[in-house]
Structures are given as structure tokens and as C-alpha cells.
Image: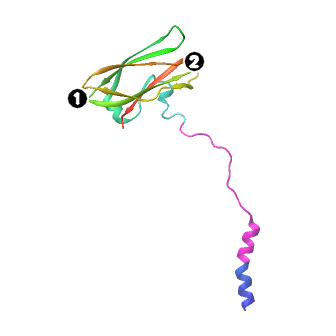
Amino acid sequence: MKKTLLFLGLVPFSLMSFSGCQTHDTGAFRPQNTTVNKLEDSAQFVLLDPAAQYSVTCDGIQQQRLADGRLQVGANVRNRENRRIQVQINCEFKDGQGFVVENTGFKNLFLDENAQEGVQFVSMNDKAQRYTIRVRQAR
């Protein structure tokens, strides 16, 4: 009787050792949602969060090519609220295909009530063809 119970107790373990590891690997996957949230690929000015979208707008953008080939971009950023706000702003300079060649760091921008401020960015080399100015709420 003891031998039978011992044998029946060892059968599941021995079956597990012969079953091997089964994988459910299906290979590579395609990226999801490639057509969603791609505004930064085409727009020159984007707001990165709902607070910035509510508080900030851009009245105009100027761009010019400097004598040495660098791209200079200027934007008029306006506070839409009746209170002083602080936002962070940067510029991503991109090549002709839309790949980032330079990313300026975010800098703080203080906007008085209903005020407009001009902000300028200059690329560090002549590789920049396009750009995206990005604004987010200061944290």
C-alpha cells in the first residue's frame, strides 16, 4: 500500500519533468497607436498638458535662416488667464525627415496676466530644417 501511494505521488512529478518548457513566443509585434498623438510630428507649436492648453496660446511664429545656416525661431506666447503663470518652454529642431537633431532644454517662462512674451531659439548647427516649440505647465 505504501509503495502504491509513493508511486502515485511520484507520477505527476515525473510527467512534469518530461513535458519540457512550453513557450508562447509569437515573435515581433507592430507598434500600437502610431496614428494617435502624433501632433508633434507636424505642428510647429504644441501644448503638452491640459493646464498649458487652457492657459497658453501662440499668436505668431517667425523663422529665419541666419548667415551661417543656423535656424532661428521666435514665438509670441500669450497668457490667456487673469493671473500670473509659470510655464516651461523648449524647442526641438528637426532634420528634413522629422528626426530630432537638437533639443533645447526646457526653460522657465513667467507670463503676467493676459501678457504676451517673445521667446527665441537658435539651432546650434545648420542641420535643422523644421522645429516644434513645446510648452508645458511648470512643476
Badge 1 local density, few (<14 within 10 Å), some, or many (20+)?
few
**Mark 2 sits on what residue?**
127
Q: Nearer the viewer, residue 115 or 31?
A: 115
Image quadrant holding the N terminus, namely: bottom right
Toward the bottom, the furthest residue is 1
Figure quadrant of the C terminus: top left
Name the amino acid, label 2: Lys
Asked if labels 2 and 1 touch by Cβ distance under 8 angstroms, the answer is no
Task: Please report the bounds of the magenta region as a residue range.
Answer: 11-33
Q: Which residue is mark 1?
A: 82
Q: Nearer the viewer, mark 1 or mark 2?
A: 2
Label the magenta part by its dominant secondary structure: loop
x and y, in percent, of residue 39 in the image: 47, 29
Whether 26 is among the magenta residues is yes
Q: Amino acid at mark 1?
A: Asn
Looking at the image, how many numbered discs can be counted on the residues? 2
